[in-house]
């Protein structure tokens, strides 16, 4: 049976994003997934017809990078902003550099990455695919008065690469990395391979070097028939070569006849072999048990607080800053006007294509603003190694000037540009965030409030998840010796 025939014979049609997930190729007898109601979605007849027209163009194994998907599957924020989900629980890592036990430092870093996956809208949605040169920046203000700063930039469009940088000078943490999603159509599913790497530095522990983390892959089921369902699968690895600690965390997908959803299991290894095991569910709670049987909670989504982020209001943003760039699409999605959303999305894509055409005709390379290629990775052009040598107050001043000020921060001249890109220092920045800005404290506790919180324009403060009171951390406190 052909793909289009399968769709026509299905009772319900569904769709998945090109940032979605993977499973096996479908057959007419495949059982529809069930799963948590918050993780599933059923499309109406009109949406199903659009999906049928889209999927009629696809072939098994096809790369979905250049496929334009219907706007009703879009999550109303850019992928550059979605990456901030992994800096939404900073209490898991703040002060980790003060811990004497290298295993506990390692577990704090591991928990930070595991904690980002529970933040998501209902059903199967994909964030906007960033266009080349698009960027997102924001500030975090923590309860103790310290701050964190985040910036991400789309440094390549084909293949898509998003580079990101987070720093909290007074909390002595730096995170750099890249996200390189690759998507394929597999029948009744879509696979997104999340290539790239997160690199974490604890500035109070330079002897640890960098902790490197890879992502699991994302799975979207039920795009031909049944309910759409999002799963994570495969291996996420955490490594600290200097301390010889590692953990391969398997994100388990549900089997045909047994098993459950959203389970994780991993083994922590050290210089002398296995030290303990991580188990739990990425959307609920996860724990670590050492070889003696002693347990400690790594993360509990039900009792945690999500740190809100502050971004410049739309009228303070530059034209290629994410929320301003996609604002018309976001408003249309929020108003359930899919026709207007599609038209506005097409305008952005047309500008992107025209820019490519002009650069090809002139031989000009795209110039990066905040990042520069260093071998196979991208690093902030502010100079992280030199930045880390400054005291916290000076680090904070330099970062603010680099991200929001008007004074150029000259990038190092030794790095070679990546294909199609040339590093350039940031030039005309928008005004810094006002200290007395009125804040929108909308939280995300349902699908409707998610759309409201992530779509309101202008907005200064948004939260990617419900800020519920409760214990933040059940591991040994970061200042433990």
Image: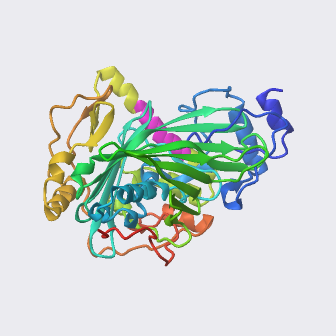
**Which secondary structure class fits the magenta region best?**
helix
Quadrant of the drawing holding the C terminus: bottom left
What is the quadrant of residue 449 in the picture? bottom right
Q: Is residue 448 above or below residue 410?
A: below
Q: Nearer the viewer, residue 411 or 26?
A: 26
Task: Residue at 78%, 48% (x, y): give it.
Answer: 45
Image coloring type: rainbow
* x and y percentages locating residue 456 in the rendered image: 48, 65
Above or below: residue 440 compared with residue 178: below
Q: Is residue 57 visible?
A: yes
Query: Where residue 125 sits in the image (x, y, percent)?
Result: 60, 50
Q: Residue at x 17, y 40 (%)?
A: 411
The magenta stretch spans which residues?
A: 343-354
User: Could you tell me which residue is drawn at 54 percent across and 62 percent down?
Assistant: 293
As rendered, which of 123 and 99 lies closer to the eye? 99
150 sits left or right of 183 in the view: left
* Residue positioned most to the bottom: 469
Q: Is residue 185 magenta?
A: no
Location of the N terminus by quadrant is: top right
* Location of residue 298 in the rendering, given as x and y in whole percent from the top left corner: 48, 63
Residue 134 visible in the picture: no
> Image quadrant of residue 101?
bottom left
Residue 141 horizontal/vertical position (percent) = 32, 70
Q: Is residue 34 above or below residue 377?
A: below
- The mark total stands at 0
Left or right placement of residue 227 versus residue 212 in this view: right
């Amino acid at each position: 049976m052909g793909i289009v025939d399968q769709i026509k014979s299905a009772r319900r049609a569904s769709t998945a994003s090109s940032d979605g997930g993977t499973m096996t190729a479908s057959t007419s007898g495949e059982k529809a997934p069930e799963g948590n109601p918050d993780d599933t979605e059923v499309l109406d007849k009109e949406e199903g017809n659009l999906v049928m027209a889209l999927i009629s163009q696809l072939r098994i194994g096809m790369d979905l990078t250049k496929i334009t998907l219907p706007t009703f599957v879009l999550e109303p924020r850019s992928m550059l902003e979605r990456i901030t989900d992994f800096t939404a629980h900073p209490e898991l890592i703040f002060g980790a550099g003060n811990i004497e036990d290298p295993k506990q430092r390692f577990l704090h870093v591991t928990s930070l990455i595991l904690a980002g996956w529970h933040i998501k809208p209902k059903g199967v949605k994909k964030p906007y695919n960033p266009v080349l040169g698009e960027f997102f920046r924001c500030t975090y203000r923590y309860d103790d008065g310290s701050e964190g700063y985040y910036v991400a930039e789309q440094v390549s469009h084909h293949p898509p690469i998003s580079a990101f940088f987070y720093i909290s000078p007074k909390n002595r943490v730096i995170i750099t990395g890249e996200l390189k999603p690759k998507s394929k159509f597999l029948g009744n599913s879509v696979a997104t391979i999340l290539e790239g790497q997160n690199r974490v530095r604890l500035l109070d522990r330079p002897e640890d070097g960098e902790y490197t983390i890879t992502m699991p892959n994302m799975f979207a089921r039920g795009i031909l028939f049944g309910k759409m369902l999002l799963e994570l699968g495969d291996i996420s690895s955490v490594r600290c070569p200097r301390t010889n600690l590692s953990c391969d965390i398997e994100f388990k997908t549900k089997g045909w006849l047994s098993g459950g959803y959203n389970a994780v299991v991993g083994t922590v290894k050290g210089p002398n072999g296995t030290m303990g095991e991580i188990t739990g569910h990425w959307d609920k709670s996860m724990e670590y048990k050492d070889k003696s049987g002693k347990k400690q909670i790594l993360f509990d989504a039900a009792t945690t607080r999500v740190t809100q982020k502050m971004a410049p209001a739309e009228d303070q943003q530059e034209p290629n800053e994410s929320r301003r760039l996609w604002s018309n699409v976001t408003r249309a999605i929020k108003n359930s006007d899919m026709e207007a959303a599609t038209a506005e999305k097409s305008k952005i894509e047309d500008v992107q294509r025209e820019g490519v055409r002009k650069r090809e005709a002139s031989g000009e390379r795209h110039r990066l603003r905040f990042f520069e290629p260093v071998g196979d990775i991208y690093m902030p052009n502010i100079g992280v190694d030199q930045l880390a040598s400054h005291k916290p107050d000076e680090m904070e001043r330099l970062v603010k000037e680099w991200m929001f000020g008007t004074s150029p921060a000259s990038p190092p001249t030794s790095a070679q540009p990546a294909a199609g890109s040339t590093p350039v220092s940031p030039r005309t920045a928008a005004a810094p965030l006002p200290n007395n800005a009125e804040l929108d404290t909308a939280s995300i506790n349902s699908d409707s409030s998610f759309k409201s919180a992530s779509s309101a324009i202008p907005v200064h403060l948004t939260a990617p998840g419900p800020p519920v009171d409760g214990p933040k951390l059940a591991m040994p406190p970061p200042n433990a010796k």
